[in-house]
Image (cartoon, rainbow, N blue to C red):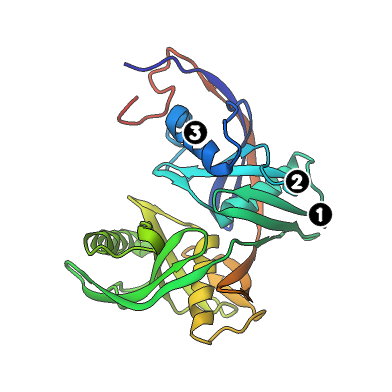
Amino acid sequence: MRENLSYAIEVVDSHTEGEPTRMVHGGFPELRGATMQQRLDDFRANHDRLRTAIIHEPRGYDAVVAAILTPPVSPSALTGVIYCNDLGYLRMCGHATIGVIRSLQYLGRITPGQTVVIDTIAGSVGCELHPDGSVSIRNVPSYAHALDVTVEVPGIGNVTGDIAYGGNWFFIAPAAAAGASALEYDRLPELLQRSGAIREALAAAGMSGLDGAYIDHIELTGPPVRADAHARNFVFCGRNNYDRSPCGTGTSAKMVTVAERGELSPGQEWRQEGILGTLLTGHVERSENAWIPTIRGRAWITGTSVLIGSMDDPFVAGATSRS
C-alpha cells in the first residue's frame, strides 16, 4: 500500500558539460540533523519516496542527479547540498556542484566573481563563479588508496587499475585492459557491460576502498580525441547509468593517481575529456597525506519548474517497482 504523499517541489534544471542536474530549492521537507550525514540519514529513512519522485519517470529520467538544498551546517557555508540519483545517494558530485552554482546564480543568490562554500556529505567544498560563467570547485581531500591492483573479471580476464577517492570511490583502468574496443559514444552497450562486470568482480573479490568502502564507480580511460585534452574517460555509475560529462569526482580521482605516479605536478593543469567530447580542467595541490583537487567546468540552465504530486497519482513517487 502506498502511504499518503503529495508535494509541490521547486526545481532548477541544468546540465554540466552534458550531464544533468536538478537542484531542489523549495517545497522539500526540512531534513533533521545537525550534520549533513544526519540529514542524509533522515532523508533516506523518511523521504526516500521524494527522491524517486524527483528523479524517476514521469517527472525525471535515470541520468538526472538531484541536488537537494538544505541550510548550511558550517558557519562559512552558503548552503548544504545532498546529492542523489536513481540508484541512491552520493557523498559528493562535481558536475552537480557546478550545476548548483550556476542555478544559484540564476536565482540571484550569487554573482560572478563570488566565492562560496557548500557543505556536502563528503565535507565542505569551495566554489568560485567566474565572470565567464564557468565554475571552479576546490574538492574534498582525495587520495590514491591502491595503485596497480588486479581483479579477475569473468568473461574479460585480469584487469589492472587503481582504486582512488575523489569524493566518491573509483576503480580506474585503461579501456584496453578491460577489453573495450574504443571509448566512443556508439560503443555504450559494450562499455556499460564491461564496466558493470568489473564492478561486480571487485565486490566478489572483496576489493574495496578505505574501511571497506564500496567501489561504486568504474572509470575507463584512454587517449583523447580532442587535441587540447590529456585523456578521455567513460565513467560507469551503476545499472545503465554513466556520466555524460568527464565527471568531477572521477576527474579528481584520476588526477590524484597521475600525481601519485609523479606525472602531474602540483598546480599543473590537467584537461579531462568525457565520452561526449566535453571537457573539465583541473589541478591538484598537496595537503598533508592527501591531495586537494580543483576542477573547472561549465553549466547551462535548461529549465525551471514545480514538480506536482497528487495522492491519487499512481506514479506520485515515480515509476518504480514500489509505486
Residue 105 is marked as 2
Callout in the foreground (3, 1):
3
Q: Residue at x 66, y 45 (%)?
A: 301
Determine which quarter of the picture holds residue 171: bottom left
Q: Is residue 77 left or right of residue 11?
A: right
Q: Is residue 187 left or right of residue 28?
A: left
Report the Cα–Cα distance between label 2 and label 3: 26 Å
Q: Position of residue 202 (x, y in %)?
A: 27, 64
Q: Position of residue 306 (x, y in %)?
A: 61, 27
Q: Depth check: 221 or 73 in front? A: 73
Residue 43 is marked as 3
Q: Residue at x 35, y 52 (%)?
A: 238
Image height of 57 relative to 263, above or below: above
Q: Are marks 2 and 3 in contact (CB under 8 Å)?
A: no
Query: How many numbered marks appear?
Result: 3
Report the Cα–Cα distance between label 3 and label 1: 32 Å
Report the Cα–Cα distance between label 2 and label 1: 8 Å
Residue lying at the far top in this picture: please name it.
312
Are there few (<14), some (14-19), or many (20+) residues within 10 Å of tag 3? Answer: many
Name the residue tied to disc 1.
Answer: 112
Q: Depth check: 208 or 102 in front? A: 208
Image height of 74 relative to 308, above or below: below
Q: Position of residue 26 (x, y in %)?
A: 65, 29
Image height of 176 relative to 115, above or below: below
The three-letter code of the residue at mark 3 reads Phe
